[in-house]
Image (cartoon, coloured by chain):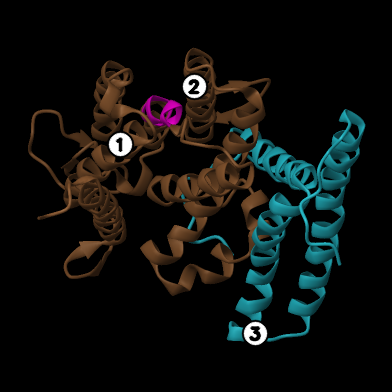
Amino acid sequence: MNFTPKQYATRNEKIVDFVLGFLGWYLVNGLLYTCSVMLLGQTNGDNWLVLTLLGLPLVLNIAALIVLARLRRWIALGALAAFAAMLVLVLILGILAYAVCFNSSFR
Amino acid sequence: MYPILFHVAGVAIYAHGFFLMLGMLTGLLMLIVEARRRRWPKEELVPIALAAFVGGMIGARLSILFFLGASTAPVVLNMYTLFDPRVGPGSIMGGLIGAYIGGYIASRAIGKAGCACDAFAPAIALGTAVGRIGDFLAAEDGLGKASTLPWAVPAPGVSYLVHPTPLYDAAFNLIWFGVLMLLRDHPAMQNGNLLKLGLAGYAVFRFGVEFVRNNPVVALGLTGPQIACLLLLGALALYYGRRLRSAAPAAI
């Protein structure tokens, strides 16, 4: 494993890493989401295992972003842009959905 | 109240989402204008702003666990509910703290020397002022506690008048935006000090306004946002205390 930060020499390298991060974020989170739904289906009730499984993707996302920001900055930027794009989409959809700051009855 | 603003081709446009989006756009526009005025390069602005946005959205949601209790954990901890517009974004207090942490991590990751984050301060105040109008129109959390003041308003589900707390928030942020704009070129308000002042000012206001809001008391007779405000103010006091000590000449 190479833990030294990558030095980008060309614009092309930056673009490739950005695209890798952007598409990779959707791919990895698609897999994580599918896995968590499948695993949650095999557990019963609100227990610590369920909460751990639910919280794992968030922890992994934050940790990956921080590590990548140090090692491959443009992959991290791509992943961050993908995350932000999803959140912007949610904000736009929020105009059409009745939402308050937090819908505590949502399950 | 007016939770639905208007209809477009039979589709309802909801006030909360509309003003949240408008507030975000207003804040973003203000940030771009201020960043350009400060000659903040886009190579730094883009990653820091993106990280602040994502960090803010995560912080807003996670803070709900602290403010409303463990029963919200299944929704709050599940990252993918962030992408469901029916849940709502969360708390602005948590959002501010999350945005600060996200922006800080990004600025360290790109090796930024010093801090240009002061460009965020007026943008946050203006964006919040706009966003709070949606909270008022949607009668968020029943608006506030009972009031007999001349500006008290009716709220859904109750027969008495209440404090229009989202409008207090909007009015404060509008005034605070003006104050921050006046102070933005002051020499003492550079290198992150304007942003810290902006956050501290909002924390002081929010601590007070929580007494007439309907948030549940968490501990010591205080609501979750009030405790968050105290922690934020404590952290800022600690930061400036340490800076003052290190700047003071050594005692002889």
Residue placed under numbered mark 1 in the picture:
B166
Quarter of the image where one finds residue A67: bottom right
The residues bearing labels 3 and 1 have C-alpha atoms spaced at a distance of 38 Å
Neighbor class of circle 3 (other Cα within 10 Å; few <14, some 14-19, many 20+) is few
The residues bearing labels 3 and 2 have C-alpha atoms spaced at a distance of 41 Å
Q: Where, quadrant-wise, is the C terminus of chain A in this rendering?
A: bottom right
> Looking at the picture, do discs 2 and 1 lie on one chain?
yes
Region rendered in magenta: B118-125
Q: Main secondary structure of the magenta part?
A: helix
Looking at the image, is mark 2 or mark 1 nearer the viewer?
A: 2
Residue placed under numbered mark 2 in the picture:
B26
Q: Position of residue B205 (x, y in %)?
A: 21, 41
Residue placed under numbered mark 3 in the picture:
A49
Q: Badge 2 sits on which subunit?
A: B
User: Does the magenta run of residues contain B242?
Assistant: no
Q: Amino acid at mark 3?
A: Leu
- Residue under the point 32% across and 43% down: B156
Does residue B177 sit above or below B100 in this rendering?
above
Q: Position of residue A10 (x, y in %)?
A: 89, 31
